[in-house]
Image (cartoon, rainbow, N blue to C red):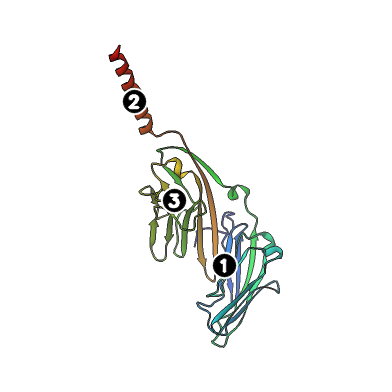
Amino acid sequence: MIKGSCGIPRLSICVFADGDEESVSVTERDSVTLKSGFTELKTLDDIEWRFSGSRIATITRNYGEISVWVKADGSFRDRLQLDNQTGDLKISNISTTDSGEYKPLISSINGSPPEVTFTVKVNPVVVSAAEVKSVSVLVGDTVTLQTDLTEIQIGDEMQWRFEHQNTPIAEINRATEIFITSDGPDDRFRGRLKLDHRNGFLTITNITTQHTGLYQVEISSTISSYIIHHTQSFRVTVSGESINEIYLDSFSVNHLDENLFALN
């Protein structure tokens, strides 16, 4: 899990297990995945997720097909996702109004996992923590984008993305010891990315104007029977000319002056 305590506003993660009850403390605007207890749904398995007693999502696995329904209106509009393999429920961009009791009602002829009631408390976000961080650099510089982490823990996963691209440019899976960087779909990051294995900081070397844009990192931490998803954003602006370009321009001008002097 990400190191933290109930007093840290960035990513307050607190777990208090009491039998079949789980207390989840999460920061506003983060996302959380509540696990159903299934690793894979089988034929005739049914799950109905309820929030404060009201149905918000259901999944049914019949012979040869899976039927999924999520509440599309009201306060959860466009913020619920149901995993059709496990029945896990993800709540994105969570708000304080989402605080309350969540429960998966499970019906299965194959044997059901223990039912868990999740009591979710959403803490107000610190305004400065929700802002996109602006970073300005010159062409040829090296820049390091720093996460809030001091150390990545077992169960943590991290993915860096550039400009909302689906494919990550860097990722970490601490449990499987995966630490990789990518050149990007158009090779613009070839040989330029370095990933700190301890804290997930991303370094871009010899930066160019092609690297101007939005960088986002999603940090997912598995804690008992739920997952916290925390996102940080960086707006990088690259300006100016590289040293090589300036040198070549100066050389061209001096060479031209020498030729003109020789003609005179």
What is the crowding at mark 1: few (fewer than 14 residues within 10 Å), some, or many (at least 20)?
Answer: many
CA neighbours of label 3 inside 10 A, class few (<14), some (14 to 19), many (20+): some
Residue indicated by mark 1 = 33
Mark 2 lies on a secondary structure that is helix
| Percent position of residue 129, x then y | 58, 49
Horizontally, residue 30 falls left or right of residue 249, namely: right
Q: Pointer 3: what residue?
A: 201
Among numbered discs 2 and 1, the one appearing first in the sequence: 1
Mark 2: amino acid:
Ser
What residue type is disc 3 on?
A: Phe
Name the amino acid type tagged 1. Answer: Thr
- Sequence-wise, the earlier of marks 1 and 3 is 1
Tell us which disc is closer to us: 2 or 1: 2
- Image location of residue 99, percent across then percent down: 67, 64
Count of numbered marks = 3
Q: Foreground: 118 or 70?
A: 70
Query: In this figure, which residue is indicated by the disc labeled 2?
Result: 252
CA gap, disc 2 and disc 1? 60 Å
In percent of width and height, residue 206 lies at: 38, 41
Q: What element carries label 1?
A: strand
